[in-house]
Amino acid sequence: MITIRHAASLGTAHDGGQVLRCHFAFADYADPAHGHEGRLRAVNACTLPAGAAYRIGPEAAVDIVTWVADGTLATGMTGFEPDALGTGGLHLASTGSGCAQLAWCAGGQGASFIQFWFLADTQGMTPAQEMRPALPELEDGGFRILASGFPEDDPEEGESVEDGAPVTLAARARLLHSALPAGEGAAYGTAPGRVLYLLVVSGAVRIGTQELHAGDAAAISGLTDITVMADEAAVVLLADVAA
């Protein structure tokens, strides 16, 4: 089954001093019809003006994956060194047994980012942070794994993170990315008992006969194989989680 969530139907939450556009109930946005999607707890989009910060905490037992849609973002996580990300960069805050505070601060031109919150399947882990830069040279139109809790998705021992290795989730989940040229498609297969959540960052795509435009999303259950076709050049993010 494919259920479309159009951008105009998203909720608005006020959290950490900022305004979020939310796909699921979050902070002061209550939505009984959209509490979560399987083990995917939240999908939130935020735009920060120059120098502004989004701060939250404490948090535990959740993996927060932040993907920078535009601009630059400085990260802050209790117990870890700050770092900076540009457009297409990725930050993982794996909160494990507990993290007192997390922060993301926009650079001089502001920043837009999308966060996916995955419920951890392994409890009591030591908090961890990982970063990945954008690697446009690895884009081939197909789905590329940005984050994964599956050991088989890790590169062979000895390879550096610059080769595009995914960040390591405490959840048995994946986050994938695809930059699709107009008229081309990307296929993805998963196992039974999984739920997929596809978010269109830009452009326009189709899944079967269903059309999605920038900001739209599709919750997909009961299917193990999907093909996403681009009606115009598009960027999409795909979460694969346990139902």
Image (cartoon, rainbow, N blue to C red):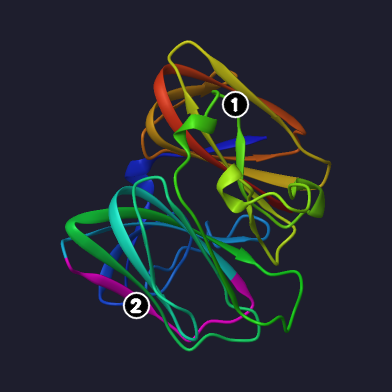
- Residue 54: image location, x then y, percent: 31, 72
Q: Residue at x 45, y 50 (%)?
A: 133
The amino acid at mark 1 is Gly
- Residue 158: image location, x then y, percent: 74, 53
- Could you tell me which secondary element the residue under label 2 belongs to? strand
Above or below 211: residue 78: below
Q: Which mark is residue 55?
A: 2
Q: Residue at x 51, y 21 (%)?
A: 206
Q: Which mark is residue 48?
A: none
On-image quarter of the N terminus: top right
Which residues fall within the magenta stretch?
51-62
Q: Residue at x 69, y 52 (%)?
A: 241
Identify residue for label 1: 142
Q: Residues within 10 Å of mark 2 (few under 14, many from 20)?
A: some
Tally of marks: 2
Find residue 222 and report its image quarter.
top right
